[in-house]
Amino acid sequence: MASGILVNIQEEVTCPICLELLTEPLSLDCGHTFCQTCITVNDKESIIGQEGNRSCPVCRVSFEPGNLRPNRQVANIVQRLQEVKGNLEEEQKRNLCAHHGEKLQLFCEEDRKVICWLCERSQAHRGHETFLLEEVAPKYQKTLQSCLQKLKAEKQEAEELEIKVREEMSTWKTQIQNEMQSVQENFTRLRQILNSEEVKELKKLKDELEVILKELAESENDLVKEKLLVTNLISDVEHYLQGSTMELLQILEVSLMLLQRSKPFTFGKFDSIACVFWNDWLHLSPLFGSYIEIIFIPTIKG
């Protein structure tokens, strides 16, 4: 039935002059259509009459060359017809045996191949169980239908797993972002604490320096006085040693009393200054003990 329809369509789009499918079809005012080359180039008696007038080769109605008009609708029909014929030819080739050129109408159950009647009698398939295509088609259609259902189920499972993976990704992303924000906030507070402690410690050191310098200045003054006293005593003792025995013995008791009353040279508590800074910073150590390393290991269940 389909081939009969194609034949009817082909007759409608066949050029009356060359009897081939219309190429670049041009239509006349009378309604007949011809190939462009056939109706314009060829000076045939069927087109040009004895009086030199041009007329339709089918109905002999006169026409002017300027009245020829392209027929795009017919051109589209021709193109579609050629595509359909090409597909039919390919299908017919697929339905023919590549070895014998006969129609493929049998199915070899053992080799699971579509064969022709000559293949059935060949050495390759001799003795094998064969069936008509119409007989085995329902069986394998059922098998393929079962495979199709299985594939659809696998696809659905994959889609569900894909959704779960995306949800897991979103959860981890949110959790990690929250952890990052928490770390940033904690370190911001820590920097604020450190900056505050830095200011405090620097002020304490500055105050300590002022106290130390003041004490050292006082010690320096005391040392100057001690040094002057000792210098004077040295001068007096040297003078008496060079004098007479009577004079030496007369001032001996006074000189010994002065020597006993002179202060020894002292430098106070400045040997512990180097430890002040370190000991004052020991109270900051708990600030660094509240951070632990967190390692996230994502797992996907198979």
Image (tube, rainbow, N blue to C red):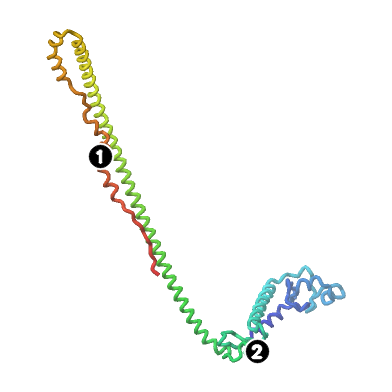
Query: Residue 108 location, x and y as percent?
Result: 58, 87
For the C terminus, the quadrant is: bottom left
* Mark 2 and mark 1: Cα distance apart in space: 106 Å
Query: Residue 195 location, x and y as percent?
Result: 31, 40
Dividing the picture into quadrants, the one containing residue 11 is: bottom right
Image height of 123 relative to 10, above or below: below
Q: Characterize the local packing of mark 1: few (<14), some (14-19) or many (20 or more) Cα atoms within 10 angstroms.
A: few
Quickly name the residue at label 1: 279
Query: Residue 222 location, x and y as percent?
Result: 21, 21
Q: Viewed as shown, does residue 143 lie left or right of 233?
A: right
Quickly name the residue at label 2: 118
Observer-nearest residue: 143 or 24?
143
Name the amino acid type tagged 2: Leu
Q: Characterize the local packing of mark 2: few (<14), some (14-19) or many (20 or more) Cα atoms within 10 angstroms.
A: some
| Residue at (31, 43) in percent of width and height | 192
Observer-nearest residue: 53 or 223?
223
Q: Name the mark on residue 240.
A: none
Dividing the picture into quadrants, the one containing residue 33 is: bottom right
The outermost residue toward the right is 50
| Residue at (26, 36) in percent of width and height | 275
Q: Earlier in the sequence, mark 2 or mark 1?
A: 2
